[in-house]
Image: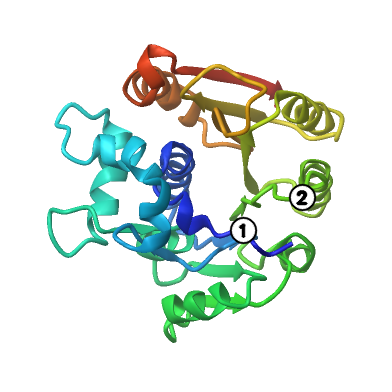
């Protein structure tokens, strides 16, 4: 199914968590002079117009980046995130939100490489425009979960793979766990960041169990919720499962997630979870 458009959800609370974690990992990888490879299995169009029809339909960004835009009391990693997002708007107004490929393009150095995968026929064109003849970037109109496997291990022997499907199809929960295990078997020293939504908690529980039984090591989970789990339709929380995270990441998230849960939570019902799924 290819009906999903992230433009409806760009800049929401889930994007806040996902992109804070993404920035923290990339900045950590940059601490070494050696180049690294960034792989995005579900890249999307690259950027999103928050003053366009899609974003304005549900205005999800208002309870995400919109809540942080003008605040002056941001934790350090949240401030770094907001300052980067501001680079994509022409004024002090919040008009544009970068997706993961645009964030990576902004942060990566000249010798680092980006491999971006997207299946949607409209969004692949926009993603190509983002690349814009940048020699660091290769864009593929392909299934990233399948085709990115061939890029592992990268020639740099250092890398981050972001796995960020829409979970439109319920089988995605089992598919991402299987793909993550297969990627790890090919490149066990790489860093992998898997985003997930919480819509039906039992699916997330199965996902976590599948990862825990997959013979991985050093796996951390970071989750941010804005309201309690419910049987009603809609995403109440989202999280990032990170394999081989930077050693600094857990401490950073322990300082940051309580603050985000308080600020972005719906009427005081925000929560967070930090859990070691697998030890080193």
Q: Residues within 10 Å of mark 1 (few under 14, many from 20)?
A: few
Q: Residue furthest top?
A: 268
* Sequence order check, earlier mark of 1 and 2: 1
Q: Residue at x 41, y 26 (%)?
A: 252
Q: Nearer the viewer, residue 280 or 164?
A: 164
Q: Residues within 10 Å of mark 2 (few under 14, many from 20)?
A: few
Secondary structure state at the residue bearing disc 2: loop
Quarter of the rendering containing residue 236: top right
Q: Residue at x 27, y 32 (%)?
A: 76
Is residue 31 positioned above or below 267 on the image? below
Q: Disc 2 marks which residue?
A: 169
Q: Residue at x 36, y 46 (%)?
A: 59
Q: Nearer the viewer, residue 24 or 141?
A: 141
Q: Position of residue 183 (x, y in %)?
A: 77, 52
Give the colour scheme shown: rainbow
Is residue 6 positioned above or below 213 on the image? below
Q: Can you see residue 31?
A: no
Quarter of the rendering containing residue 77: top left
Q: Position of residue 149 (x, y in %)?
A: 77, 62
Q: Position of residue 204 (x, y in %)?
A: 72, 29
Q: Quadrant of the C terminus?
A: top right
Q: Quadrant of the N terminus?
A: bottom right
Q: Residue at x 66, y 77 (%)?
A: 141
Quarter of the rendering containing residue 159: bottom right
Is residue 227 positioned above or below 138 on the image? above
Q: Disc 1 marks which residue?
A: 4
Q: Nearer the viewer, residue 244 or 69?
A: 69
Q: Nearer the viewer, residue 56 or 133?
A: 56
């Amino acid at each position: 199914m290819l009906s999903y458009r992230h433009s409806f959800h760009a800049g929401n609370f889930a994007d806040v968590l996902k992109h804070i974690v993404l920035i923290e990992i990339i900045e950590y990888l940059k601490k070494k002079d050696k180049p690294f490879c960034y792989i995005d299995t579900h890249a999307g169009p690259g950027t999103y117009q928050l003053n366009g029809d899609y974003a304005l339909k549900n205005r999800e960004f208002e309870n995400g980046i919109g809540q942080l835009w003008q605040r002056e009391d941001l934790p350090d990693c949240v401030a770094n995130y907001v300052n980067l997002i501001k680079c994509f708007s022409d004024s002090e107004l919040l008009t544009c939100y970068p997706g993961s490929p645009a964030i990576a393009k902004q942060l990566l150095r000249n010798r680092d490489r980006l491999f971006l995968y997207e299946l949607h026929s409209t969004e692949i064109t926009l993603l190509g425009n983002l690349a814009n003849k940048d020699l660091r970037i290769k864009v593929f109109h392909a299934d990233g979960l399948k085709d990115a496997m061939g890029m592992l291990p990268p020639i740099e022997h250092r890398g981050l793979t972001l796995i960020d499907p829409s979970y439109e199809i319920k089988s995605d929960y089992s598919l991402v766990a299987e793909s993550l295990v297969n990627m790890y078997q090919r490149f066990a020293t790489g860093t992998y960041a898997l985003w997930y939504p919480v819509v039906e908690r039992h699916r997330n529980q199965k996902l976590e169990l599948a990862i825990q039984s997959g013979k991985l090591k050093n796996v951390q989970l970071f989750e941010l919720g804005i309201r309690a789990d419910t049987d009603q339709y809609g995403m109440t929380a989202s999280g990032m499962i990170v394999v081989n995270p930077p050693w600094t990441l857990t401490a950073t998230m322990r300082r940051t997630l309580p603050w985000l849960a308080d600020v972005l939570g719906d009427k005081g019902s925000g929560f967070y979870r930090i859990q070691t799924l697998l030890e080193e």
